[in-house]
Amino acid sequence: MKKNKPKYNQIIEAAVEVIAENGYHASQVSKIAKKAGVADGTIYLYFNNKEDILISVFEEKMGQFIEKIAHAISNMNNAEEKLLKLIEMHFHQLSEDHHLAIVTQLELRQSNTDLRLKINSILKPYLTVIDDIIIEGTRTNMFRDDLNVLLIRQMIFGTLDEIVTNWVMKEQKYDLVRKAPEVHAFIINGLSVQSK
């Protein structure tokens, strides 16, 4: 399978850097190839076009991230702990790789409708993890029983997403991961049974 080949991974990593540094529209395939240390033609053995590279970057990185989160929360005791871990990991993943943060928070937003639909479908498993945490919290009486799961999921994801975007726009001048407990406390305050 092409995704197991070292050159595929080299191209993905090079694409993240090139797109972050130059912007998606100014990132020619030749620049990505040069950064990856491969011939231009080699790119087309793995990808159909530049759009395919951008989608693949997001798919690879998001796929790895979802696996890490699912593994990390699988043995945790309750929904509140799971949500904190998810927030911490979301912030950690993007603060660890500022090129990836620029690509996901800025460059993917400038894409066309077709590309955005593909991105939304890649995001679905992550949103499902958030849904499962909300449902578990409700089922165990940790969270309110009148929650609209889809709306709460949008609010949680939207909050995390906006905080990371703001951090990118401010040129990563503060520790993003240290914001996790405060963000978690605010969200939990709205979800908890006591706030009903």
Image (cartoon, helix red, strand yellow):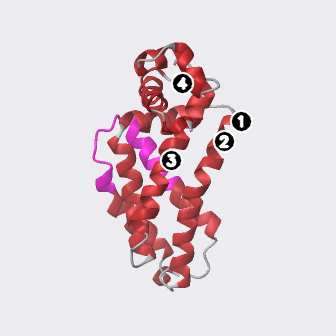
Which residue corresponds to mark 1?
114
x%, y% of residue 11?
Answer: 47, 27
Task: Point out the tag, 4 or 3, that comes first from the N-terminus.
Answer: 4
SS at mark 4 in the image: loop
Q: Residue furthest right?
A: 114
Please state which of residues 139 and 179 is positioned toward the viewer in this rendering.
Answer: 139
Q: Which residues are magenta?
A: 158-179
Instruction: Categorize mark 2 by other alpha carbons within 10 Å: few (<14), some (14-19), many (20+).
Output: few
- For the residue labelled by badge 2, is the local secondary structure a helix, a strand or a loop? helix
What amino acid type is highlighted by mark number 3? Met
Q: Which disc is residue 160 wearing?
A: none
Q: CA distance from mark 1 to mark 4?
A: 15 Å
The part of the image, by quadrant, that contains residue 52 is top right
Q: Is residue 171 above or below residue 125?
A: above
Q: Is residue 61 left or right of residue 128?
A: left
Cα distance in 3D space between marks 1 and 3: 18 Å
Give the crowd class for mark 3: few <14, some 14-19, many >=20 residues within 10 Å: some
Q: Are marks 2 and 1 in contact (CB under 8 Å)?
A: yes
Q: Which residue is mark 2?
A: 118
Which of pointers 1 and 3 lies earlier in the amino acid sequence? 3
Measure the alpha-carbon separation of dots 3 and 2: 13 Å
Which is closer to the viewer, label 4 or label 3? 3
Position in image of residue 192 (x %, y %): 47, 78
Number of numbered markers: 4
When the figure is inspected, residue 51 is found, relative to residue 187, above or below; the finding is above
Measure how far apart labels 2 and 1 are at the Cα level: 7 Å
**Magenta span contains residue 171:** yes
Residue receiving disc 4: 24
Give the prevailing secondary structure in the magenta stretch. Answer: helix
- Residue where numbered disc 3 is placed: 62
